[in-house]
Image (tube, rainbow, N blue to C red):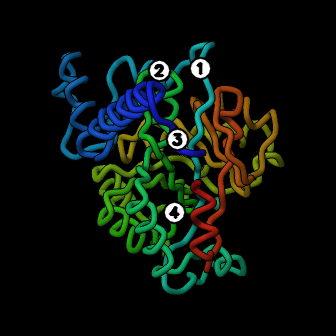
Amino acid sequence: MPPRAGPSRLPAVTVLLLVVMVVAVVGTAFSLNASQSELRFRDAESLGLGAAFGAGFGGAGEYSKIEMAALSGPLPTDAADVAVPVLMYHYVDDEPPPAGPYADGLTVRTPDFVEEMEYLVTNGYETVGLDDVYLALAGLRELPAKPVILTFDDGGLDNYEVAFPLLQKYGLKGTFFVITRAVGEEGSMDWDHLREMVAAGMAVQSHTVSHPDLTRIPAERLQTELADSRDAISEATGEVGYALSYPGGAYNETVIEAARAAGYVMAVTTDGGAALGPESLFEITRKRVQPFLPMATFARLVD
Ligand SMILES: [Zn+2]
């Protein structure tokens, strides 16, 4: 389109200025996790909850009373869908762990992971948690302009030794879904690791007690797999249990109802896709980050 001249130019400039101003305001408020934390902290202080907040940011207990209530209740009926890519990782390491035939295909190699995190940072993406999304749907938090959620399933020791330090280096947040019975076993993270990660702003949520196919177990065991893992994480780390990751991505209506009854407000699957809204909170789709993914493909995943 040729450049327009004359009177029509002024409104265009005004609109552009407005856009720049909005971007600047949003950018100032949400460009850094630290500043976001300060905002939350101020909110909390104004509610007289300052003393309840520990050191660090984004970790356990960083909810106002209103947010806590929202995280355990239904969303407002007018809550609208949001577009937030949810990426799914398992292991991040130079070599796959000796964890069975699938480990190789589930291990993103360290140099590739570094490149992916650098891509996110240099392209203005900001990591948020699933709790941030839920509270945004509830109208209590605002999401950054380019939000992305990084999830890690299964609780491998590499998550603590490789992914966690890199996330910290780049100022990013990860959501780690752990199998509570495996915590502390050889090759897995232990509770001290998880406490340290929560204190540093990472999220630790449930991938059940023992990683069964939830669609194929009796009702009583389904209940304990969901409730006991949520309780164990909460007791050990102080995290509020809001999210569940279905083992193997397997779920049905019975599983969703049981998850709801156990106190979760959202759950992630292993299916690819993008929609994230009030109607799909227990069927949140994720984009699998395959090992040796070309950067152009990674870029499309978060776009
Ligand atoms: Zn798993």
What residue is shown with label 1?
Answer: 79
Judge depth for marks 1 and 3 and give the one in front.
1
Residue contact at pointers 1 and 2, CB within 8 angstroms: yes
Disc 4 is placed on an element classified as: loop
Q: Which residue is at a point 31% across and 57% down the rendered structure image? A: 171
Residue contact at pointers 1 and 3, CB within 8 angstroms: no
What residue is shown with label 2?
Answer: 139
Disc 1 is placed on an element classified as: loop
Indicate the position of residue 242 as horizontal and vertical percent values: 52, 35
User: Quick one: label 2, few (<14), some, or many (20+) residues within 10 Å?
Assistant: some
Picture layout, residue 105 above or below residue 135: below
The earlier-in-sequence mark between 4 and 2 is 2
Indicate the position of residue 89 as horizontal and vertical percent values: 57, 64
Judge depth for marks 3 and 2 and give the one in front.
2
Indicate the position of residue 59 as horizontal and vertical percent values: 32, 43
What residue is shown with label 4?
Answer: 155
How far separated are the C-alphas under marks 3 and 2? 25 Å
> Which labelled disc corresponds to residue 230?
3
Judge depth for marks 4 and 3 and give the one in front.
4
Q: Is residue 206 left or right of residue 237?
A: right
Specify whether residue 18 is in view: yes
Indicate the position of residue 91 as horizontal and vertical percent values: 54, 71
Picture layout, residue 142 above or below residue 65: below
